[in-house]
Image (cartoon, rainbow, N blue to C red):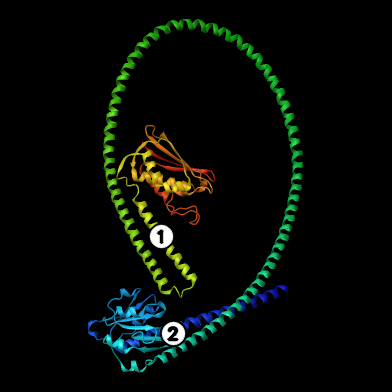
Amino acid sequence: MRNKKRIKSIIKIFFVVLLCLQNASNVYAQDTDNKQVERLQRAIFIYNIAHQVAWPNATDFNDVTIGVLGPDRTTIDLQAMAQKRNIRGKSVNVITYSKVKDIGSIQILYVNNRFHYDIAYILQSIKGKNILLITEDYSYNASMINMVSVGNSFEYEINESLLAIENFTIAPSLSQNAVSTAQKWKALFKDTQSLLEKEKTIVSNKDKELLEKDTLLKSQQDILNSQKDAISQQEKSLQTKEQAFEKQLDSIDVLWSINQLQEQKYEDKVAIEKALEKQITEQIAFSKSTQDQIVKSQRQLKQQDSILALKNDQITAAETTIDSQQSIITSKTKINMLLGLLVGLLLLGGSYFFINYRKKQALNATLAAKNKEINKQSKALSLKNTELEQFAYIASHDLKEPLNTISSLIMLIKDDAEDTLDPTILQNLEFMDDSSTRMRSLIETLLQHSKLGAMTNVELVDCNALLEDLQKDLATVIKKNQVVFHIDRLPAVNASKVELRLVFQNLLANAMKFRKADTSPIIKITYSRDADEAFPDQYYHTFYVTDNGIGIPEIHQEKIFTIFQRLHPDEAYEGTGIGLAHTKKIVQAHGGSISVESEPGVGSTFSFTLPV
């Protein structure tokens, strides 16, 4: 029964929320409908006025161009109307100007007073250009044709003297329907102000209703939350009871299994004792029989010892005769062995030289074939590298174009509709703009990554001088972070100076960036000369860059050398995740390798090798 009552109350609250949301959407839809009607009426009104005006230079232009001054949404409405209507049989173009001095060769200029452009300066700028000036909400008799909004429609007044200066001819119907006196113009302003005040009171009343409904929603939501909390607590108590019951069942099962094991162990012990007794009796019988056999064998051994003594005497006599004959044989065999060794050495030397000659011929043939293959592969690789560079450049250029278009469209949307858009939508547009900017920077860094490793200018580089120049360039960052350096005497290496500088710069920048809070970075750069394990004749320069930073977990130590791989969010540590990928590609292009050893909270040691 209690659950049914709760469900009914939840359903009632749900329907109340739906009604409030529906009322709010109706209010918003009504306001937007009124604004759209007013915008449509404004565009129609401008076209109707233009139809009733004749230009003195109408034969000089094929299209009618309407200029809109300021970031006004009327531009969009006029462009939409231009798809359906023309002016005096000519197609219509609509353009926007932000400054009065930028106004070019147009036929109609529309200006709204809400953007605060000086009407006298506008008239002076377009004087003698045969431009029809249509304004809105300016003072009486200040413009050629001035409009004012009345409800969902418009009224207008005409300054015939200004029209006559530019030699415009207007239709009689246009002057007949215009407001003829300043008193009528003021009355129209008063009517519009009263309508605005009424609209404001209606809007304020609706806002109050919405606030009341919001408070009702919040109270209902609180009731719902309290009921949800009570239900969740009941579910938790049931779960705890079920878990206790299951634990009791598990303990009973364990006791039953222990009892069965104890019974089985007792039976096994009895069987094992019986088997041991049987085995012991068998072993006693076997030991008695073996003792009898040992006594017999001892007797036989004594008899055999006496026979062996006689045979030893005979053997000593035979050995004396054999020794005399052996001395003669050894002298002859030594002579034969010396002759055989000489012949064997001659044969081995000839065969060795013959085998080496054949091997050299075979090696020369294989080397020539491999050189041809290597030349073909190097040509193919150079072609592929050039194609890849061209592809990377074209791809990055083509990828930038849609990003630039997106940024331009976002800027246009913000300029045209910044006053009417919801703040959430504006924030989303900012996120879109930031994302396109970040994408553009990632494309540029990808293009830079594709160009690394060319090694077109290899030279002998003094690493000590290179690091001194690098410290001078990073002096501001080093001083700001209070960095302490310990640098050994380093060798000169054959490398690309620009790319080797980039390797040290990326490693030092990471050591300064990923430091512990309230701790001055300590950076050590050491060096050793090591032999290759596979080829002992090949030596490598090994450089070590050690810091006392935040460290890297072991699971991520391979991931950091992959392009665009980051371990931290942008708000914690800025960057694109490409610096160490650059470093790895440069070191591998020089014939070396790079690795890292790190402990979180203690620091990291990056080591890279370059061949001697």
Q: Is residue 454 above or below residue 291?
A: below
Q: Which residue is mark 2?
A: 37
In the rendered view, does 105 fall on the left or right side of 486? Answer: left
Question: From where the camera sits, is residue 216 visible?
Answer: yes
The reply to whether dot 1 and dot 2 touch (C-beta < 8 Å) is no
Which of the two discs, 1 and 2, labels the residue nearer the N terminus?
2
Image spot of residue 138 (x, y percent): 39, 83
Quarter the N terminus occupies: bottom right
In the rendered view, does 25 fall on the left or right side of 539? Answer: right
Q: Amino acid at mark 2?
A: Val
- The residue depicted at 39 percent of the width and 44 percent of the height is 472
- Residue sitting nearer the eye, 142 or 516: 142
Q: Which residue is mark 1?
A: 439
Mark 1: few/some/many CA within 10 Å (<14, 14-19, 20+):
some
Q: Secondary structure at mark 2?
A: helix
> Label 1 vs label 2: CA separation?
41 Å
Mark 2: few/some/many CA within 10 Å (<14, 14-19, 20+):
few
- The residue depicted at 66 percent of the width and 13 percent of the height is 299
- The residue depicted at 31 percent of the width and 42 percent of the height is 458
Q: Secondary structure at mark 1?
A: helix
Quarter the C terminus occupies: top left
**Which residue of the protein is positioned furthest toward the left in this rendering?**
59
Front disc: 1 or 2: 2
Image spot of residue 373 (x, y percent): 28, 43
